[in-house]
Amino acid sequence: MKLSVHKTIRGKPTSAIDLDGRKWYESQGQRVSLGYGWMNVEADWLDVFELITTDGCATSAELSSDNRKEETFVSRELLMVDIDSGMTIQQLLEDDFYNACGAGFYTTPSHTMDAHRFRIMFRTETPMTDSHLVKLLIVGLMRMYDHADPACKDSTRIFYGTPNCVIKECTRS
């Protein structure tokens, strides 16, 4: 599986506003750019799952440079649906589509027992190289899970990992 990981971002970075009113991000005590600093990797699914749920790496599509934007999209093999409310993990585990097609899930750091927040993961059989088709597939998955975050549909979307995630499931090797 090919994808890109950010060299520095582990978990969700914190944001701040500088004296000039510009927003910036920090991860692990370092200022980071969400657009630059991406590195392509190739790994098997179990290693990718660990990168996201143990190391907490931020991931995106495979890119043609270290600049994450639509124009540098190469391919995507891992799709995610971001659930911030309206669905529980128990409901996911009972979902027929997830059980037939899902590759796993992991909770985000803001997950609580009263407010479930998690990402549902899907793998494609082959790399998808058409960014428009990737977006259509993501939109289709979001319709399957109507509580999905509607902002998370572009082909080079960042998905933050969860360092040392406790509640997770990897269903496909």
Image (tube, grey):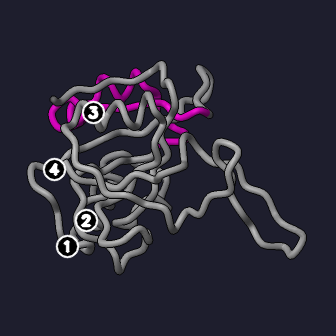
Q: Tag on residue 47?
A: 3
Look at label 1 and name its amino acid.
Asp
Which residue is under mark 4? 124
Q: Tag on residue 89?
A: none
Point out residue 127 in the picture as x, y percentages from the top left corner.
14, 58
Residue 147 position (above or below residue 66) = above
Residue 82 position (above or below residue 89) = below
- Image: magenta residue range: 83-109
- Asked whether disc 4 touches disc 2, contact meaning CB atoms under 8 Å apart, the reply is no
Q: Which residue: 26% across, 72% down?
A: 131
Point out residue 17 in the picture as x, y percentages from the top left corner.
81, 64
Mark 1 falls on what kind of element? Answer: loop
The quarter of the picture where the C terminus appears is: top left
Look at label 2 and name its amino acid.
Val
For marks 4 and 2, give the CA distance.
10 Å
Point out residue 92 in the picture as x, y percentages from the top left corner.
35, 29
Q: Tag on residue 130?
A: 1
Residue 25 appears left or right of 125:
right
Q: Mark 1 or 4 closer to N-term?
A: 4
Look at label 4 and name its amino acid.
Thr
The nearer-to-camera label among 2 and 3 is 3
For marks 2 and 1, give the CA distance.
6 Å
Mark 3 falls on what kind of element? Answer: helix
Mark yes or no: residue 143 visible. yes
- Asked whether disc 2 touches disc 1, contact meaning CB atoms under 8 Å apart, the reply is yes
Residue 25 appears left or right of 150:
right
